Image: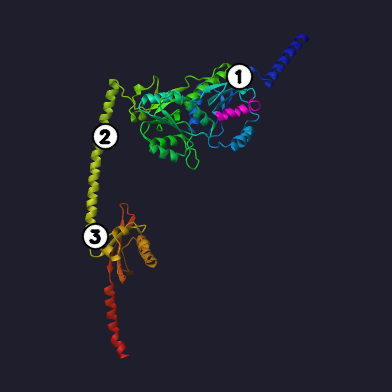
Amino acid sequence: MSLLVRARYRRVFALLLLGAWIALCFPGPAAAAGEPKKVLILHSYHHGFPWTEGIMAGMQKVFSEAGDPPQLHVEYLDAKRYHDTEYLDHVLEGVFDHKLAGRRFDLVLLYDNDAFNYVLKHRHDLFAGTPIVFCGVNGYRPADPAAGGMTGVDDSPSFAETIELALRLHPGAEEFVFIGSTDNVPGRLFRRALEALAPRFPVRFQFWDDLPAEEIEERLGRLPANRLISIYGFVRDRSGRILPFAESCRRIREASSAPLYGFWDFFLGQGAVGGKVVSSERQGRLAAGLALRVLAGEDPDAIPVIRSGANVYMFDYPELQRFGISPESLPPGSLVLNRPPPFYSVNKEYLWAGLGIMTGLLGLSLALAWTLRLHRQVEQKLRDNARLVQTLLDAIPLSVYYMDVQGRYLGCNSASEEFIGRSRDEVIGRTSEDLFPPDMAEQYRTADAELFRTRQIQIVENKFVGADGRDRDLQFHKAPFFDSRGNVEGLVGTILDITERKQAEQEIESLARFPQENNN
């Protein structure tokens, strides 16, 4: 091989090595394209809050179905439970500034005003150049200087549509009572929006703002007929605790017979009839869909904020039934939840299969019924035998008792009840330690333990203080009883009062000693 050819090979080999080094050290667009997009989801409230969970469910559903799902980083500001200015202005800022500093995301997806305000405040430090998609934001103004590079879903409740529908469904209504709070920005915005609507409707608007739940319940109990109710904000109890929406809705429904209408979907199933509601799951789905468009390269400023079609007519079937409202009288396209399942026709194969199963179940039921009848007959026979045995025991003049190996009395006869001064119910299930003085109980327990060990009939004598308070001499005749495998199950005992015999023996012994003592 000539020197010229060898030099050419060396140059080619060197170029290949250089290209490999560049590819390793400076990965190009093809390598970057394989990395998932990073999305920060910033929730205003805490995990487990119904609105938060509905929003998140909608987002996850859309992202899970995407061809190239992004990598999600989820944070919760917890501004519902901690809404004081100290937390919002200092604690929250410090914690999240530390958690998010130095992190870079391809998009920020947020919901509600607290998260929106936080992102706007840090638009030029933590989120510089990052596109934003929002949902659940009240009072969004596109003219805001910091509102560039973002789009989202409008969260404005459909107050007018819901009120109009409620008055159409209840033409005799004279007053609409609105329950809410004005100690927060959304509450004040909603109150002003409702007040502005009042002149449009032929009924009185009454606002019960910032009242504790207990007072609301008292007022509802006195509320006249032909009233309608709605909740537009938080409700607290007298301790200041914010009630979960489900609890506040349930308590209001139980305190009044008036129809309750809602503006958000989390009231459905909790006592609200329904209305044109803001759907948390739908808000999440729409916002996630916008996020995928932005991640795909669309300019967020060129995507209009979704305003129409975000809210939907939704109703709870049991509440419709409660107030005699026919689903046919609702707006077209309304969603009716918790409707009983309809009856569907089936083909012959399914029908015969169902009948066969039902016939088999019927046969099984008859067999079980017959078995149960026999079982009850056996139980009745056992109860009859037990009564017979108890009658026989009660006919015995001696005290008779029986106990298990743990020393618990299982039964006794009438003579035993009279002898110890306790009823059978007081004796059964108890031990000697429960019924007798400690020294006496210890003697009985020791003797019984010896019987269980030897498995032999035992005759012992013991002292006893009877129910009449007199000292007595007793003779116990005890025998063990066994189960089918030969294990000791307990003992049966009879008690013979030998006090008089003992006294007679002592008198005979005294008389026998009398002549000897006189001779001495």
Query: By what rule are the colours in the image chosen?
Result: rainbow
Amino acid beneath label 2: Leu
Q: Which residue is nearer to you in this view: 224 or 54?
A: 224
**Circle 2 SS class:** helix
Q: Quadrant of the C terminus?
A: bottom left
Query: Which labelled disc corresponds to residue 33?
Result: 1
Amino acid beneath label 1: Ala
Which residue matches tag 2?
364
Can residue 396 be seen at all in this image of the molecule?
yes
Range drawn in magenta: 113-127
Mark 3 or mark 1: name the one nearer the start of the chain.
Answer: 1
Q: Nearer the viewer, mark 2 or mark 1?
A: 1
Q: Quadrant of the N terminus?
A: top right
Q: Residue at x 64, y 33 (%)?
A: 98
Residue 109: x %, y % from top left: 56, 25
| C-alpha span from label 3 to label 1 | 92 Å
Amino acid beneath label 3: Leu
Quarter of image, res 167: top left
502 up-or-down from 192: above or below: below
